[in-house]
Amino acid sequence: MKVYFKGLNKFSKPKQIQAVKDFVKYLQTELPLKDDVYITFKGGRDIKMTTGVRRPGSQIFVLADKRLMIDILRTVSHEWVHEFQHQKMGLKGKVQNIGGPVENMANVLSGIFMKKFDKIFPHYSPVIYEEE
């Protein structure tokens, strides 16, 4: 399984790019995927999404412009959970159920993964919280 990134130029600092890559490696240890994943960081909402969306073909799109790094990573994590639900749990099609079990799972796990990543990789805290 490999992750392909597009739009990493949305991040102005090399430490931010490394944080994104290491966060995705961490996600792979928590929720391993079998198929390649394509993560695209967008400058605007030129596709239908709020802050991120998972699409067929293992594609994840994340809004990056004018957002804090912690929010961007949480969105990556949220959409990663949805990809896991499709690849490993057999979820089919698009689910639009605000407050439903599929969305709740993504919300809960993405919050947990953010906190664990921050604890395991404290050297990224200044990057995540944009303190440097």
Image: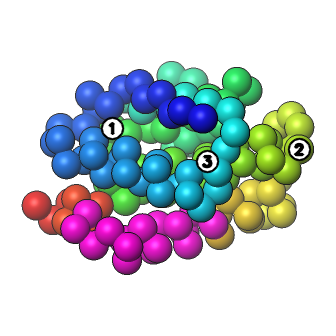
Residue 19 to residue 101: above or below: above
Q: What's the amino acid at mark 1?
A: Asp
Quarter of the image for residue 17 reads top left
Sequence order check, earlier mark of 3 and 1: 1
Considering the numbered disc 2 on the image, is that residue within a helix, a strand or a loop?
Answer: loop
Q: CA distance from mark 3 to mark 2?
A: 14 Å
Residue 103 to residue 6: above or below: below
Sequence order check, earlier mark of 3 and 2: 3
Q: Which residues are magenta?
A: 109-124
Q: What's the amino acid at mark 3?
A: Trp
The circle on residue 6 is none
* Residue at (57, 24) in percent of width and height: 47
Whole-percent x, y for residue 19 in the image: 31, 51
Farthest left residue in view = 132
* Residue at (22, 59) in percent of width and height: 127
Q: CA distance from mark 1 to mark 2?
A: 32 Å
The circle on residue 65 is 1
Of badges 3 and 1, nearer the viewer stands: 3
* Residue at (74, 57) in percent of width and height: 103
* Residue at (88, 44) in percent of width and height: 90
- Can residue 95 be seen by looking at this rendering? no
Q: In the rendered image, which quarter contains the C terminus?
A: bottom left
Residue indicated by mark 2: 90
Q: What's the amino acid at mark 2?
A: Gly
Residue 64 to residue 131: above or below: above
Of badges 1 and 2, nearer the viewer stands: 2
Sequence order check, earlier mark of 1 and 2: 1
Whole-percent x, y for residue 125 in the image: 26, 68
Residue 32 falls within the magenta-colored stretch: no
Residue indicated by mark 3: 80
Whole-percent x, y for residue 36 in the image: 61, 30
Q: CA distance from mark 3 to mark 1?
A: 19 Å
